[in-house]
Image: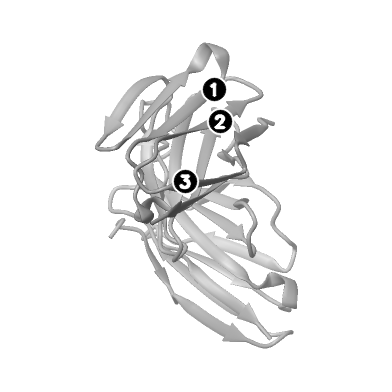
Amino acid sequence: DSGVTQTPKHLITATGQRVTLRCSPRSGDLSVYWYQQSLDQGLQFLIQYYNGEERAKGNILERFSAQQFPDLHSELNLSSLELGDSALYFCASSVGVQSASGANVLTFGAGSRLTVL
Amino acid sequence: GIQVEQSPPDLILQEGANSTLRCNFSDSVNNLQWFHQNPWGQLINLFYIPSGTKQNGRLSATTVATERYSLLYISSSQTTDSGVYFCAGYNYGQNFVFGPGTRLSVLP
């Protein structure tokens, strides 16, 4: 157990629907990152939050949004789902973006596997 | 942003063999990690190694920061080592960039 908790583990839904993926970071970690991994593809960075505020944005579609709550858990909302959104969605956490050594070591959750039919 | 290359893209080994995986960065990085994605999709952190050498059992890693590359050594490979190995780099003010991965298959 990495300490990063993601729910649900599996999700099957239909095109056009909306889903919410949830992530609880490791205790003490302030930064949360979301990554998308399509079949046999690499890891695409979507978005990062630090202590409730958006820190960096990657290749995140406008149909997707995320937020980090005061208790530091994060949710990734995917709407108007398309077949191509089927993927593994990973959450990772780190202590934060400070310059201290090891502050940005990523720890990943087990992922949420989304299947859009 | 940083570009990350990994080689080889695919590797097939017999159980017991040794291997070396390489990661090259287009620019210097402040943080470098190696991950193993097992066949079930889990991403396991192997090493945090911005510079120097570390060892953990049959695995070891070396990063030469001045030359912008890192090596992951797997000795006496086992079937459970199969999966995809990713390296990822990070620079202050930027974000983690992952390489495309090396897919390792260890045959019994």
Q: Quick one: label 3 or label 1, which is nearer the N terminus?
A: 3
Determine whether label 2 and label 3 are within 8 Å by CB: no
Chain on which label 3 sits: B
Q: Amino acid at mark 3?
A: Leu
- The foreground one among B99 and A49 is B99
User: Picture quarter containing residue B28?
Assistant: top right
Secondary structure of the residue carrying tag 1 is: strand
Q: Closer to the N terminus: mark 2 or mark 3?
A: 3
Where does residue B65 sit, x and y in percent of width and height? 50, 16
* Residue contact between numbered discs 2 and 1, judged by CB atoms under 8 Å: yes
The dot on residue B23 is 2
Q: What is the quadrant of the N terminus of chain A in the image?
A: bottom left
Residue A31 visible in the snapshot: no
Q: Are marks 2 and 1 on the same chain?
A: yes
Q: Position of residue A23 (x, y in %)?
A: 43, 64
- The type of residue carrying mark 1 is Tyr
Q: Which residue is mark 1?
A: B69
* Residue located 44% across and 66% down the image: B40
Residue B39 picture location, percent across and down:
46, 62
- Name which residue lies at 31% across and 56% down: A2
Left or right position of B56 against A115: left
Residue at x-position 37% and y-position 48%: B15
Q: Secondary structure at mark 3?
A: strand
Q: Which mark is residue B13?
A: 3
Above or below for A25 versus B58: below
Chain identifier of the residue bearing label 2 in the image: B
Q: Is the Cβ of the residue at disc 3 closer than 8 Å to that at disc 1?
A: no
Q: Residue at x 60, y 52 (%)?
A: A43
